[in-house]
Image (spheres, rainbow, N blue to C red):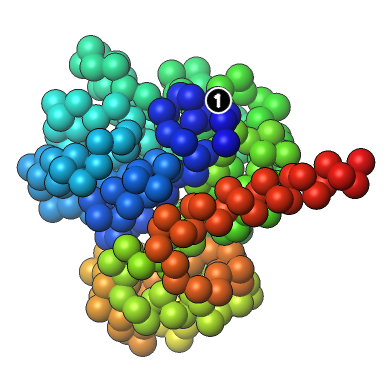
Amino acid sequence: MHTRLTELLGIEKPIIQGGLAYLAFAGLAAAVCEAGGLGQITAAALPDAEALRREIRLLRSLTSRPFAVNFAIGHRPLESYLDITLEEGVEIVSVTGGNPEPLFKRADVSGVKVRKLALVAGTRQAQKAESLGADAVIAVGFEGGGHLGRDDIGSMALIPRVADSVRIPVVASGGIGDGRGLAAALCLGAEGIEMGTRFVATQECIAHVAYKQALVSGKETDTILIERSLGRPGRALRNAFADGIVRAESEGRPIEELLALVSGKVNRMAALDGDLEHGFVWAGQVMGLIGDIPTVRELLDRLVTEAQQVLQAASSKL
């Protein structure tokens, strides 16, 4: 499938692996790259910048194809991580969770040519990212897992609005997990898709099997919004612990108590150790479309084949 996104990033399939917290490391990213998509390492999940350097070099030993480093703003200072990324000659970076301007400017003054992607949740953010030099924007709808925008706009309305508001390629994210979603995104004006939750339920992802099985067995109604009172709403798998987070927010518990409930440590305990009783994991409504745990290559090949079939069937109806 050829779009402006595949041309921009040098990939075969217009599919990007999201920056999954504590899961987006070299193994998963390499599998996505080798299957024709764009894999990503998430910098903020690593303990320090030198650890990122090692992860980048490990990824390079596993694939010769393009990959990206994701910078999730708000977790820790990321300037040193970006410097290492540029030193290592990574050609693509993505910025999520906040204002990309400081990191974009730092990349620009470095003199290293790098393609810049920015996650947005509305037209104003998309236009701002374009004005800052973003080469593409990733528009995430309200259905998505993890941290979202504050305006509760679904992908069906968001994607065409963003596509109409900028000249650069738009990537659709949120609620996409099969070929029908890929076909729909293209019809809405996007040049490709980003998936997060669907990549958790793959064989190469290091997520605990309990997390993966919860995604397979769950429905689209089995998610819940947490952290809204903190100004950073995110969609998680609904369980007793996540219900407790929302209850604590509604009761106006002290900020220190809330931050402890949604800490990275609690998230890692559930995502990596499988303790879904005492922790939370991120999940989008797309979990209702997840029915198996394939290899990454099987998943990407299936998505493209299904999308082509859906587009051909739609064309025949005209």
Above or below for 313 versus 108:
below
Please provide percent x and percent y for residue 91.
29, 27
**Residue at the spot 61% in from the left edge and 72% down from the top edge:** 288
Using the rendered image of the protein, determine whether residue 155 is visible from the camera's viewpoint. Answer: no
Left or right, 155 with reference to 5: right
| Quarter of the image that includes the N terminus | top right
Using the rendered image of the protein, determine whether residue 3 is visible from the camera's viewpoint. Answer: yes
Can you identify the residue that label 1 sits on? 4
Going by the numbered disc 1, the residue's amino acid type is Arg
Left or right, 108 with reference to 100: left
Above or below for 55 versus 91:
below
Please provide percent x and percent y for residue 244.
44, 81
**Residue at the spot 55% in from the left edge and 25% down from the top edge:** 4
| Quarter of the image that includes the C terminus | top right
Above or below for 133 versus 144:
above
Residue placed most toward the observer, 67 or 274: 67
**Residue at the spot 25% in from the left edge and 78% down from the top edge:** 273
